[in-house]
Structure formats: structure tokens, C-alpha cells
Amino acid sequence: MLLQNQYDVDMRVRRKAEALVAAGYSVDVLALRGTRAQKTYTLEGVRVHTLALGKKRGSLARYAFEYMAFFLWTFLWVTFQMPRRRYAVIDVNTLPDFLAFAPAFAKLMGAKIVLDMHEITPEFYISKYGIAEHSWAVRLLAYLEKISFDFADHVITINEPIEELLGKRGLPRAKSTVIMNSVDEARFSSFSRSSAAVEAAAVPASFVMMYHGTITGIYGLDIAIEAFALAQKEMPGAQFWILGNEGRDSDWLESLVQQRGLASKVRLFGVVPPSEIPAWLNKCDVGILPMRRDALLEFATPNKLSEFIIMGKAVAISRLKTIGHYFSEDALAYFEPNDSADLARQMVGLYQDSEWRARLAAKAKEEYAPIRWDVMKERYLMLIEDMVGPLGHAATEKSQTAGTAAVVE
């Protein structure tokens, strides 16, 4: 698996890799160096090889440099290892899309290329940099996207609306499979749902609304704070907890909280370990996901929504295209994106009506069932099985007998 990210924190890739190991495959991952000092290590049966390339992104030029450096390293690594390892499948995870070409030599030797498109690149850059939709830069990104999925033997997309969008850009439906970004319930439920650290940090409250995840402008936390300010008088005892990365954006939110006189009711707790998330979720009554509407987020399926649903929590969420594709009005408390007054209305309704919260949570679980990770995992394993084929299985058995590597890179 090729991944220009830290493997330890990329749960989508970890879910796939660990599912493959559990199914009997041998898996190598090429990724960025994380907090571990080791250049190479094994995690849950997956061999991880890393490159010390810091993520210092900001400008397009910096993105380009990092993309090319990682591309060159993976190209050389796979090219030199392929004659010995004889990989059957190379699972390439974007961004960038053109990373699909790094295992070109392996493809010539018979490996199948699976391109897992974590993002839709033109929309990603339109959202991040405000690039005009019809600019030369977006046309270039769309061209790189197309030649990348044309080169791959099969393409994974993260939801059906994205699959449909890419179909309009030339991706044959028969060549694509949807593997949604669902949470591994087995891993999630195995974490402790109570924690001394959470008990010590959490301020007692009669009703808790919560957001957990990345703190950045596009996720609309300022909208949620403004909404809470509008609704607070009708929600005595309620608090809004925000869990996420600290930095410039969180400083700005702290300032907004002070300006609105919400210091005792809106709490920013900073980053919490993944193992603690279930315990925090267990403390809350309602999830808040206030994403803004833009070219990228219309197609988003946030992990955090899955986690709230698994924990049986009602969720107030922006009315966006892809979320509405999977979840009905009976499953989520929708509000118009960027509209703090509409979110405030839903906050008050959820606070006051415990029966409505219970109905929403139950319906969301029902509608989530067809896209849960157990279903997605079997779909992914069937895809890899098809890609490997009889010759791949023979090579796998031979390599396992000999005590060497491996099937999936």
C-alpha cells in the first residue's frame, strides 16, 4: 500500500491493511514517518516502511515538492523490490492521484494497480485555495485525475455520489467500487467507554453537545458557537464540548467564545487520544457537525458521523448532498449550512425532545447498517481476491511456504 500520510493515524488504510492480514495476505505499507523513531516497524501484522518527509504544506509549490519526493521514493522502492517480492496488488491511496504511476514497473511485471481515491482532487483544491472552477490549475488537476484512474486496473471511491461524479469525468462504472469510510465497530467498541482522564477533564453538565475532529474553518465550528449563543437561554444547563487540534484556529474559536460570553458553557479540550473518544462520546447527548457547504464538502461522508451513530447519539448536521444521499430526514437533524439560526433551532429541539433524539438515533443506526465497515470490508476483500486471481494465490502460497514476503504492497 502506498500512502503519503502517517500510517498510524490513517484509519482508512489501517482498516484495509489489517483486514488483509486477517484474511491471510502479507502486507507492506510505504508511508511517511510518524512519531515512531523506527524507519521500519510492524503494527498488527502489517510491515510499515517510512520516509522522513515532514508535512509542511501551505502553498501549492510545497504540495508539489512533497508529492514528487514521495513519488520518487515509492517508485524506486517498488521497482527494486518487485523482482524479489513479486507483489500481486499495489493499493495506491491518494492524494496525489498520479501516485498511481509509481508502481508502473510492477504493473509491467504483472501486478494489479488499485487506486483508492480518498479525495476528489479538483474539488479539494477549489475548497482549500479558492481556485476558480474553470481555471487552468483545475483543468490540469482534472487531467491528472483522469490519466491516473485510466492507468489503474481498478478504482475505489468513498461514496456513490463521488462515483457518479467520476463517471461523468470518464471513469467506467465497471471499473469502480465504493468502499465507504466507515468506522471499524469492533475496534471502536473494544475501547473503554469510561476513562479516568475523561472524568477528570469533563465538567459536569446536565446536557452535552459535542464536536470532535479537525478544527478548521470549513468545518464551521464558529457557526456552531454562534448557534449555541442564540440557543443557550432555552437550554439551561447545556454545554458544548469541542475536541480537536490546538493551534491558530482553536485560538480564534477561544476568542469567539469569550466574545459571546460563553466561557462557562463552551469548552475546548484540545486533542484527545483515539482510545479516549468512545468515553467522551459516552458523555455527550447530541453530536454537532456544522460543515460549511463548498465544492468538496458536498461530497463528504465524515468519519465522525459514523462514530456518533455507533454510539447511539442523535446528530445535528449540515444539509449536504452526500449525507442526504445516505440518511433521511428521519435519521438526522438537518440544518441549512452556514445558517447559525437554523442550527440553533435544531439545538433547542434536540435539547427539549428526548423522544425525538431517540428516534433519530435508532433510524440513523438502521440506515447506517448497509454501509457499516463489516459490509465494506467484505467488499474490499472480494475486490482484492478478484485482483489477485489464481496466479496470485499460487505465488502467495509459495512465498508463505518459503517464509518470505508478500502479496499486497
Image (spheres, grey):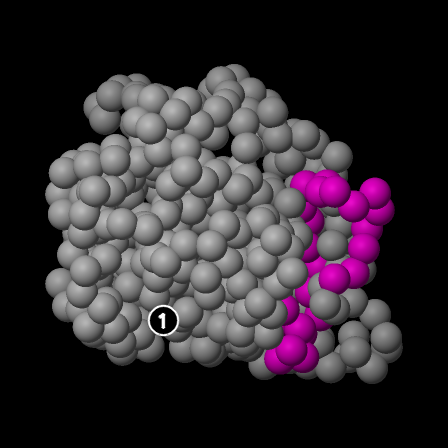
Residue at the location (45% across, 61% down)? 283
Question: Which is nearer the eye, 118 or 234?
Answer: 234
Taking the image as shown, residue 188 lies to the left or right of residue 85, namely left
Q: Which residues are magenta?
A: 18-43
Question: Which is nearer the eye, 19 or 99?
Answer: 19
Question: Which is nearer the eye, 7 or 153?
Answer: 7
Question: Looking at the rendering, in which quadrant would you find the C terminus?
Answer: bottom right
Write down the quadrant of residue 246 in the picture: top right
Residue at the location (47% across, 20% down)? 60
Q: Position of residue 48 (x, y in %)?
A: 74, 54
Write down the quadrant of residue 270 in the picture: top right
Q: Is residue 192 visible?
A: yes
- The amino acid marked with disc number 1 is Gly
Question: Looking at the rendering, in which quadrant would you find the N terminus?
Answer: bottom right
Residue at the location (49% across, 73% down)? 185
The residue wearing badge 1 is: 312
Taking the image as shown, residue 260 lies to the left or right of residue 331, namely right
Question: Which is nearer the eye, 81 or 341?
Answer: 341
Q: Position of residue 218 (x, y in %)?
A: 33, 33
Does residue 363 sit above or below 272 in this rendering?
below
Residue 323: in magenta span = no
Residue at the location (66% across, 73% down)? 21
